[in-house]
Amino acid sequence: MPTLKEVAKYAKVSITTVSRVMNEADKVNPETRERVQRAMRELDYQPNRVAQRLRTSKGYSKLLGLIIPDIQNQFYSSIVRGVEDVAYGKDYAVILCNSDENPNKERFYLDVLQSESVDGIILPPIHQYSKVVEGLIESGVPVVCVDRKLVREAVDTVVINNEKGGYLAVKHIIDFGHKRIAILTSSSQFSSFEERLTGYKNALNDHNIEIDNELIKEGDPRSTESAYMFTKELLRHDNPPTAIFATNNLMTLGALEAIHEEQLNVPDDISIVGFDDMPWARAISPPLTVIKQPGYEMGRR
């Protein structure tokens, strides 16, 4: 494997210049930078990232940490793709971790990412009042929240207007004459679900529809199973809902499975509106109504 010294000799520059090209390329003369980069390609030189982090005066590791709840959730995989595309374009690598909505696992990966000297961490915090993430920010680690907020910290955040999205979803249902509207949501520890629930309640209040707590079901946002069971329960109620607002893509899938098993048709027997833009939603006949959440663009931002 070629060494830094051999790259410098091949490119007819100093070792310092080669190091600067790897760590602060924008400060190197373009012609020299191209000569060094060409030498690295032709010699198949692979920089040692650990040594590179130790050498650079600014401490840039060219590594980003990304913690998401579950890569199998298509919405989060879209976010990952957006983050990675931008990072790769800037010569950054991404360390990906799955928290599974487990605070202990989130804490473990935050510690690992800090030990790897990442330049910053991107995550949807499991809890909107997370003391662990708050402490990370206060220690000076650059953090960006995506999809969810931290309430007590001023931190860069990429989210949609979840409350408005929830309101529009329920207003759409109401406009079709529905008054018995259930919601499949999750714990208020997640800012996104709390805001969508607020939008649901505001829409009902604005249209003089009484809020029935029996129609509000909180389940696991990572699986279809809890939504499936809650939908079964709702449909077998003495006074079942005529419409359901499912607040993420997996809940929508679980609800649809239960509706199908009960031999009901959408929208003839029951209406449903989902959250998150899902390619498969357009394959359903008639196409499913959803509130679009552009995961890829959120990741890029």
Image (spheres, helix red, strand yellow):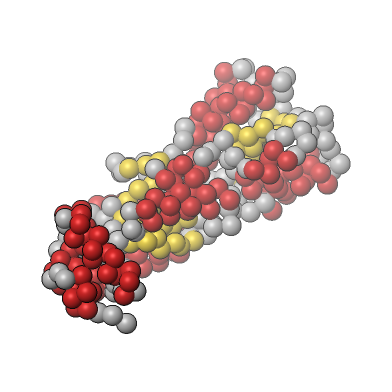
At a point 45% along the width and 42% down the height, the residue shown is: 298
At a point 17% along the width and 63% down the height, the residue shown is: 20
Q: Is residue 112 left or right of residue 229?
A: left
Where residue 277 sits: x, y (%)? 59, 40
From the viewer's side, name the closer residue of 224 and 288.
288
At a point 22% along the width and 60% down the height, the residue shown is: 33
Where residue 3 sits: x, y (%)? 25, 79
Q: Report which quarter residue 249 is drawn in.
A: top right
Q: Report which quarter residue 273 is drawn in.
A: top right
The answer to whether one can see residue 23 in this image is no
From the viewer's side, name the closer residue of 31 and 124.
31
Q: Quadrant of the N terminus?
A: bottom left
Q: Is residue 228 left or right of residue 164?
A: right
Q: Is residue 29 left or right of residue 48?
A: left
Where residue 144 sits: x, y (%)? 35, 48
The answer to whether one can see residue 192 in this image is yes
Where residue 189 sits: x, y (%)? 47, 46
Q: Residue furthest bottom?
A: 1
Total marks in image: 0
Taking 180 as reference, is 190 above or below it?
below
From the viewer's side, name the closer residue of 114 and 77.
77
Q: Report which quarter residue 111 is drawn in.
A: bottom left
Taking 123 as reference, is 13 above or below it?
below
